[in-house]
Amino acid sequence: MKKTTSKVPVVFGRPLARLSPARRKALLAKREAWLREIDPTHLFHRLFDVIPGVYFFAKNKQGEMMFFSQGILDLYHITDEAAVIGMTDFDLNPVDMAQSYVQDDARIYATGKPLLNRVELWFDRFGMPDWSVVNKMLIRSRTGKVIGIMGCSQSYEERAKLLQPFQGISKAVNHFRQNYHEDISIRELARLSGLSPRQRERKSRATLGVSPKHFLIKARWLAECRALRETIKSLAEIAFDSGFGDQSAFTRHFRRHIGMTPGQFRRKEVVK
């Protein structure tokens, strides 16, 4: 009889290690111990009370994942929930995205204030860049000690009708997503939003946290990082796909925003 083996989950091109029964048991026990510390008034259901149909997660103060909703497990194509416990944002996401999430967490810990209705780039289950609305807040123990952060994320399109502050820029956001590799002008985005360029700038900073120009730049280098990490395209091909006239211009742009050349980034990711 032919022996069947389960496939090893792959996250952004990197295989996850298989869990031994002992390791799996230890990880589940680790999470149970952490859950017992939570103040009943700060349980996870607080987020579900106000935001239906969300991707939900919780992590301890060390940034280790303690809980995922089934939707996120499906998003990453992971069937064993225990395999996620103890992972960090850097284990599950591209380094550029993970760094952004960690910086947001640091601000929440420093100020004690939740992060609400932030529009960020994420990936859908098909691996395509997608806009998501993110909410995060602190988790406290029974003694009031801060022990982690819980949060939720939902597709921008599903939330657009419910979020009045974003309705004025919905068309511009969709245009961003579909044409981020092209030379899009701020005036064109303002026209799609029905706003003047100055109004569009203010609205973008108020709702997205950055200027339209910076948001477009971020969308582009996320796509570039993904192409470098997960394709065998040459640097020249990626430069062309990203809207650059030549490879040297692409390299300068990439180094300015990522801190290394495209070649260095690709070699670093391959090593992982």
Image (tube, grey):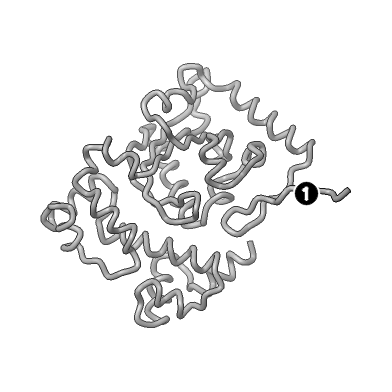
Instruction: Give SS at disc 1.
Output: loop
Q: Percent from the top left, x then y, of residue 222?
A: 43, 61
- Tell me the crowding category of disc 1: few under 14, some 14 to 19, or many 20 or more residues within 10 angstroms, Cα based: few
- Which residue corresponds to the image point at 46% horizontal and 78% vertical from the top-left? 237
- Which residue corresponds to the image point at 46% horizontal and 52% vertical from the top-left? 123
Q: Is residue 39 left or right of residue 189?
A: right
In the image, 240 versus 213, the foreground residue is 240
Q: Amino acid at mark 1?
A: Thr
Q: Residue furthest left?
A: 196
- Above/below status of 37 relative to 125: above
Q: Determine which quarter of the picture holds residue 62.
A: top right
The residue carrying mark 1 is 5
Q: Percent from the top left, x then y, of residue 178?
A: 33, 60
- Which quadrant of the rendered structure holds the C terminus? bottom right
Q: Percent from the top left, x then y, of residue 42?
A: 46, 22
Q: Residue furthest front?
A: 1
- Which residue corresponds to the image point at 56% horizontal and 73% vertical from the top-left? 232
Q: Is residue 47 left or right of residue 83?
A: left
- The number of discs equals 1
Q: Percent from the top left, x then y, of residue 76?
A: 56, 47
- Which residue corresponds to the image point at 55% horizontal and 51% vertical from the top-left? 90
In the image, 79 versus 94, the foreground residue is 79
Q: Determine which quarter of the picture holds residue 63.
A: top right
- Above/below status of 231 relative to 1: below
